[in-house]
């Protein structure tokens, strides 16, 4: 099935991926390209509309990325957001100047409701600003359709050409009518709204069948939702020619290996489980540096996986769960990532094994993968499970990783997750985790003095994981978690809660 495409030109704005996600949530496929993509390349995509993203630069800065003026001649509606509005105004003959005062945060917009962009919204509405420049003279053909106290041209429109520019960010939740504004723009574009979980599933299966007419697909199965959805799509596409390999590193959640095996058995899909915990623990003995731990875990994973893959001489393909944000990152206007993220520790495996890479999720965001997982019949509890790092608990144990310390952390973390679910808070939290610290503290249990381990709890809320805030638990939940961990995870006598936001901290500790 051929989907309509809304093209998003990226000028380095922090919300670019969020724009793409919001559009897809409204049922339209979106694709992100560099802001300076040639108009001929943009035309080749056949976009029904074009969005110019925000960005950190001033339109007048040396090296500021600008759209190819030719994109305004493609006949598609164009919506400029923040920097995108300023770039539109500048290139079409208007004037942009530094604002009297920089404007960040909430503002009150007075909107012209006769304009189709604001149809069904409110005359006075809260919007989210983030700009230092503003439009002071409109290009020919434009009229003002919205203003704030600090931005006389907070929104502008050329109805004849279907060009719109707004100084605020409709993609963020702080803009109260933002979703309706984006929906109105899609209506202006004539969008069909056919981007659904069912159509994504159908398209992915067809692509796999076209890429893999014969031979076997090996799936690098980690037990997470990305690789699990990948495995089920491959199974649906090529049946028994799918061979999921699950390397049990011994660094997973409590009883995770058994749960993964049982989960896929319900789909009639046998997995090749390799119990390699002893090998990983031997490699990690005496190692405390986090980067060295990651390197050794990755090295052992590749060695074990390569050995196991040789059991399938008819294998010609390797499937992995690369997601769209990784594709975007590799072509970002901020420069390609120094190390493009590889999922499930399979970096370099396709070349070493002489296999062709299959990536059925490479056009999807995480929330879309989850909806696809539900479409495929995966249980909700699993589909919406919090992210888990590729190196597993090896990077949630600060200091040396031993079987004893892993088991202790597994027990403490299982209690934390149990209590979060029991309190009905799991889906409100983006990620929660427990960290075992490399320190001991004095305690008193019964009538005896103890000198045992400290566990740190972490829970965050976030839209995109680029920034995050710590979650405010009810006191009674934290109290139950701490008491249970101290009582049931023998070897821990103190529990602390991490209240650091990102930035300055990261979500994981290592």
Image (spheres, rainbow, N blue to C red):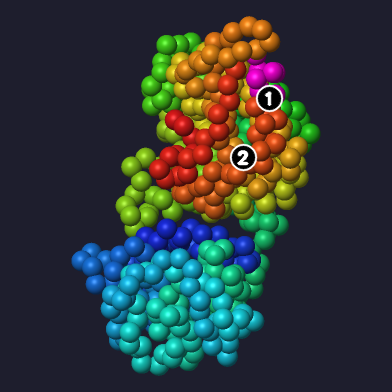
Q: Label 1, on which residue?
A: 483
Task: Identify the mark at residue 142; answer none if there is no mark.
Answer: none
State which tag comes first along the sequence, 1 or 2.
Answer: 2
Left/right of residue 164 with respect to residue 312 in the rendered view: left
Q: Residue at the spot x=47%, y=49% of the render?
A: 467
Local secondary structure at mark 2: loop
> Residue 386's mark?
2
Q: Is residue 175 left or right of residue 377?
A: left
Which residue is found at the position 54% from the left and 73% from the top? 126
Q: Which of the pair 13/25 is nearer the observer?
A: 13
Crowd class of label 1 (few under 14; some 14 to 19; many from 20; radius 10 Å) = some
Q: Quadrant of the C terminus?
A: top left
Helix, strand or loop at disc 1?
helix
Who is closer to the viewer here, 264 or 88?
A: 88
Q: Position of residue 291 (x, y in %)?
A: 38, 26
- Can residue 469 be seen? yes
């Amino acid at each position: 099935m051929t989907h309509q495409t809304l093209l998003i030109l990226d000028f380095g704005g922090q919300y670019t991926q969020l724009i793409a996600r919001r559009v897809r949530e409204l049922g339209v496929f979106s694709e992100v390209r560099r802001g300076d993509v040639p108009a001929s390349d943009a035309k080749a995509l056949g976009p029904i509309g074009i969005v110019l993203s925000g960005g950190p630069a001033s339109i007048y800065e040396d090296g500021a990325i600008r759209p190819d003026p030719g994109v305004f001649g493609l006949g598609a509606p164009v919506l400029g957001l923040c920097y995108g509005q300023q770039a539109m105004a500048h290139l079409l003959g208007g004037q942009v100047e530094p604002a009297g005062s920089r404007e960040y945060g909430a503002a009150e917009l007075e909107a012209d409701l006769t304009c189709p962009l604001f149809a069904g919204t409110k005359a006075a509405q809260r919007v989210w600003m983030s700009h230092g420049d503003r439009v002071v003279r409109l290009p020919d053909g434009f009229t003002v359709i919205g203003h704030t106290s600090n931005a006389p041209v907070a929104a502008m429109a050329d109805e004849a050409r279907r060009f719109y520019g707004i100084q605020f960010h409709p993609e963020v939740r702080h803009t109260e009518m933002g979703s309706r504004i984006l929906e109105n723009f899609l209506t202006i574009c004539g969008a069909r709204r056919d981007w659904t979980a069912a159509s994504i599933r159908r398209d992915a299966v067809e692509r796999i069948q076209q890429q893999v007419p014969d031979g076997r697909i090996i799936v690098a199965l980690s037990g997470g939702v990305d690789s699990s959805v990948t495995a089920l799509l491959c199974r649906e596409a090529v049946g028994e020619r799918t061979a999921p390999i699950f390397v049990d590193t011994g660094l997973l959640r409590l009883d995770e290996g058994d749960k993964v095996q049982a989960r896929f058995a319900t789909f009639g899909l046998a997995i090749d489980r390799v119990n390699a915990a002893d090998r990983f623990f031997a490699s990690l003995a005496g190692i405390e540096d986090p980067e060295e731990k990651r390197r050794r875990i990755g090295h052992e994973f590749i060695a074990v996986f390569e050995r196991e893959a040789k059991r399938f001489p008819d294998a010609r393909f390797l499937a992995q769960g690369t997601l769209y944000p990784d594709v975007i990152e590799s072509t970002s206007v901020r420069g390609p990532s120094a190390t493009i993220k590889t999922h499930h520790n399979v970096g370099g495996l396709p070349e070493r094994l002489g296999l062709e890479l299959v990536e059925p999720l490479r056009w999807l965001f995480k929330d879309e993968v989850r909806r696809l997982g539900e479409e495929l019949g995966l249980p909700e509890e699993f589909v919406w499970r919090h992210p888990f790092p590729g190196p597993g608990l090896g990077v949630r144990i600060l200091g040396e990783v031993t079987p004893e310390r892993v088991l202790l952390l597994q027990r403490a973390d299982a209690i934390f997750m149990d209590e979060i679910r029991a309190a009905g808070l799991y889906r409100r939290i983006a990620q929660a985790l427990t960290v075992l610290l490399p320190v001991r503290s004095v305690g008193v249990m019964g009538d005896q003095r103890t000198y045992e381990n400290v566990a740190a709890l972490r829970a965050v809320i976030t839209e995109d994981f680029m920034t995050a805030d710590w979650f405010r638990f009810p006191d009674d939940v934290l109290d139950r978690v701490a008491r249970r961990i101290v009582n049931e995870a023998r070897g821990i006598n103190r529990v602390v809660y991490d209240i650091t936001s990102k930035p300055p901290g990261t979500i994981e500790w290592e």
